[in-house]
């Protein structure tokens, strides 16, 4: 029987070169077709930062700006993150930043591209890249920014609101939990949301 050709449902695993360097992973990820998101997005947005790094942060998926620029956290969420890092005493240049899903998911409304939360199936499909990033970056602490990243690493039933500001042990990994910077940008009471975000970052950084 001929083996069936790779399909969208097989996930990223078939595109991940095992045991390779960060540069080899990033380059292989450019050609990933592990789920449908590569169709409409401009490019794969792989994680960036020092390798190895003591601190790694995981967001949700690239936004509109990240999709066109090819870099993580360069849009509004990234600017908020920079402000929060400054307030919490975190050096972005020493932090490896990535996302649970490496392609932008959106719908078009007129000329605007509106971000959509990735589906669980896309998070699962993309997980092999995150797993390999953790292997090569060897972080002492991984901070999950928001529920999508938290569920990617800690399981689908994880409740972010019950654990924000905490550091948990999971599969030999230390995982710090906080909200997504976009949730802070959109918050009704921005000042309060920003202060709570900074407090979470300080708490997990000290842990
Ligand atoms: N939101 C994310 O989760 N990641 C980015 O890179 C940008 C916005
Ligand atoms: Fe591959 Fe992830 Fe992009 Fe899907 S989102 S095509 S799994 S890199």
Image (tube, helix red, strand yellow):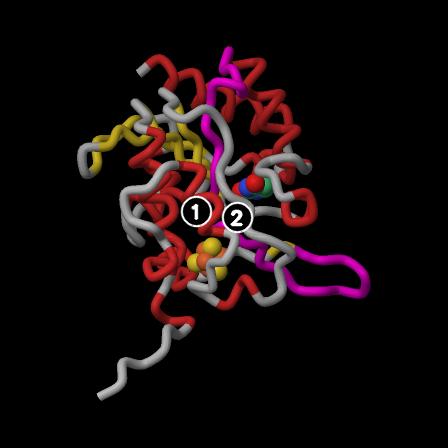
Ligand 1 located in image quadrant: top right
**186 in the magenta segment:** no
Residue behind mark 2:
61
Residue behind mark 1:
100
At a point 61% along the width and 39% down the height, the residue shown is 71
How many numbered badges does the structure rendering display? 2
* Mark 1–mark 2 CB contact (< 8 Å): yes
Across and down, in percent, residue 138 comes to: 30, 28
Please, is residue 159 above or below residue 77 in the view? below
Please, is residue 138 above or below residue 16 in the view? above
Please, is residue 84 above or below residue 142 in the view? above
Residue 64's disc number: none
Q: In what element is the residue under mark 2?
A: loop
Q: Closest to the observer: 193 or 19?
A: 19
At a point 45% along the width and 21% down the height, the residue shown is 201
Circle nearer the N terminus (1, 2)? 2
Q: Which residues are magenta?
A: 89-114
Q: Closest to the observer: 73 or 50?
A: 50
Across and down, in percent, residue 158 comes to: 30, 46
At a point 43% along the width and 16% down the height, the residue shown is 202
- Residue 10 in which image quadrant: bottom left
Residue 118 visible from this viewpoint: no
- Crowd class of label 2 (few under 14; some 14 to 19; many from 20; radius 10 Å): many
Per the model, the C-alpha gap separating discs 1 and 2 is: 6 Å
Q: Closest to the observer: 137 or 192?
A: 137
* Beta carbon of the mark 2 residue lies under 8 A of ligand 1: yes
* Beta carbon of the mark 1 residue lies under 8 A of ligand 1: yes
């Amino acid at each position: 029987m001929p083996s069936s050709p790779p399909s969208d449902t097989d996930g990223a695993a078939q595109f991940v070169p095992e045991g390779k360097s960060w540069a080899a992973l990033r380059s292989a990820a450019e050609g990933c077709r592990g789920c449908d998101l590569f169709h409409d997005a401009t490019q794969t947005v792989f994680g960036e930062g020092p390798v190895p790094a003591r601190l790694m942060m995981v967001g949700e998926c690239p936004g509109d700006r990240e999709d066109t620029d090819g870099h993580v956290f360069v849009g509004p969420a990234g600017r908020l993150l920079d402000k929060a890092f400054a307030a919490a005493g975190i050096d972005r240049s020493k932090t490896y930043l990535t996302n649970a899903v490496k392609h932008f998911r959106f719908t078009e409304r007129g000329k605007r591209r509106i971000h959509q939360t990735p589906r669980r199936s896309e998070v699962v499909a993309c997980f092999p890249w995150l797993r390999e990033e953790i292997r090569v970056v060897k972080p002492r602490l991984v901070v999950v920014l928001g529920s999508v990243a938290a569920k990617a690493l800690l399981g689908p039933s994880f409740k972010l609101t019950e654990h924000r500001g905490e550091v948990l042990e999971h599969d030999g990994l230390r995982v710090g939990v906080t909200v997504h910077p976009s949730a802070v940008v959109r918050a009704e009471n921005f000042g309060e949301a920003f202060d709570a975000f900074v407090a979470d970052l300080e708490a997990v950084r000290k842990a």
